[in-house]
Image (cartoon, helix red, strand yellow):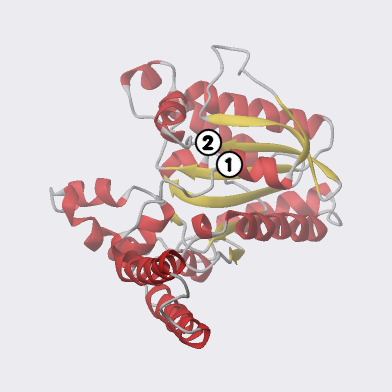
């Protein structure tokens, strides 16, 4: 697993403990007594809590982008049963950056839609690093309209730096596809639950996040633009991303403060990649509890609450 800069001291400590144990097994009894080993492990736990309890915003950004961070397909595999994937937008083609279909979570049937980045070089290229083309957003909308038709709630799993900005996407109507999703999700007559798994950038994220309840993993981020993009525009230097992260206030606690999301979903110590199974359980718990809150609302109550939620976002001063 890739070691992030802030984890260097922790990794060195872990390697030292492991090396002492291996030397002991090669030469006979361990060089350290069991009590000394326990003491070292206790110090390691203290160090982990000190490091992970005082992360800077840019260090948390690195966690949200960690190559081993669990992706949408992992969560679908772990929390969904009877998942049946559906393909295509019925207009142009199928976009592998968006996966979706029928599934059950906690015994309840859902339409589940996720942005998938891939987990190695081959799958990342195949999935276009989670940056969807217009047909991906149209596929997501088609599935959401299917959910409305069959009175199924929708779950969306968000993890993208943004929609694909290339010429081919623009030629096929990227902005129009995103705008259509925003409009149609605002009036979709079925409950929508969204979870930010890692990155949630710009319209590419919002096109799947006009939801009744939005949860966000602790170290994820939600922003109108990527930190590098912001730094390039404001300071003409993408390397100023640390300053941009501070100014954008894109971390989960700020999203709660601004009422953009309804819940911060806890991650294992150090990030979801350290214990993906626990992260998946926490995401499942959020989805199930959100459905319990929403299922008692009438459609008119649901739509009115959704409208009011997005209507009151933002602040201005004179």
Left or right relative to 21: residue 87? right
Extreme residue toward the left, this view: 236
Left or right relative to 261: residue 4? left
> Which label was assigned to residue 72?
1
Residue 201's place in the image compared with 146, above or below, is below
Q: Quadrant of residue 114?
A: top right
Estimate the x, y position of residue 95 in percent, counting from the top left.
53, 22
Secondary structure under the numbered disc 1 in the rendered image = helix
> Which label was assigned to residue 116?
2
Estimate the x, y position of residue 53 in percent, counting from the top left.
43, 77
Estimate the x, y position of residue 233 in percent, counting from the top left.
19, 47
Tell me the distance, in whole angstroms, between the alpha carbons under discs 2 and 1. 5 Å
Label 2–label 1 contact, CB within 8 A: yes
Picture residue at 51% right of the left edge, 27% below the top: 177
Residue 45's place in the image compared with 66, above or below, is below
* Other residues around mark 2 within 10 Å, as few (<14) / some (14–19) / many (≥20): many
Secondary structure under the numbered disc 2 in the rendered image = loop
Q: Quadrant of residue 23?
A: bottom left
Q: Quadrant of residue 154?
A: top right
Picture residue at 26% right of the left edge, 45% below the top: 229
């Amino acid at each position: 697993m890739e070691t992030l800069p802030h984890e260097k001291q922790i990794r060195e400590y872990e390697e030292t403990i492991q090396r002492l144990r291996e030397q002991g097994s090669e030469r006979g009894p361990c060089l350290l007594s069991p009590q000394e080993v326990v003491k070292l492990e206790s110090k390691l736990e203290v160090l982990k809590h000190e490091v992970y309890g005082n992360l800077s915003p840019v260090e948390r950004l690195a966690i949200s982008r960690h190559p081993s961070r669990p992706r949408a397909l992992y969560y679908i595999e772990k929390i969904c049963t009877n998942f049946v994937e559906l393909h295509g937008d019925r207009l142009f083609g199928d976009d592998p950056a968006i996966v979706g279909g029928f599934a059950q979570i906690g015994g309840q049937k859902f339409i589940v839609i996720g942005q998938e980045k891939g987990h190695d070089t081959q799958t990342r290229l195949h999935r276009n690093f989670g940056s969807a083309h217009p047909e991906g957003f149209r596929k997501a909308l088609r599935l959401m309209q299917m959910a409305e038709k069959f009175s199924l709630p929708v779950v969306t799993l968000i993890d993208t730096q943004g929609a694909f900005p290339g010429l081919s996407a623009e030629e096929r109507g990227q902005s129009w596809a995103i705008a259509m999703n925003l409009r149609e999700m605002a009036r979709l007559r079925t409950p929508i639950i969204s979870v930010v798994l890692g990155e949630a950038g710009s319209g590419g994220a919002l096109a799947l996040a006009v939801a009744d309840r939005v949860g966000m993993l602790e170290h994820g981020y939600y922003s109108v633009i990527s930190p590098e993009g912001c730094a390039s525009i404001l300071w003409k230097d993408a390397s100023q991303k640390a300053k941009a992260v501070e100014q954008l206030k894109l971390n989960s606690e700020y999203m709660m403060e601004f009422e953009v999301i309804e819940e911060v979903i806890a991650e294992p110590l150090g990030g979801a990649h350290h214990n993906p199974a626990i992260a998946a359980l926490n995401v499942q718990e959020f989805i199930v509890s959100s459905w319990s809150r929403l299922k008692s609302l009438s459609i008119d109550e649901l739509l009115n609450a959704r409208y009011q939620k997005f209507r009151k976002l933002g602040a201005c001063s004179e």
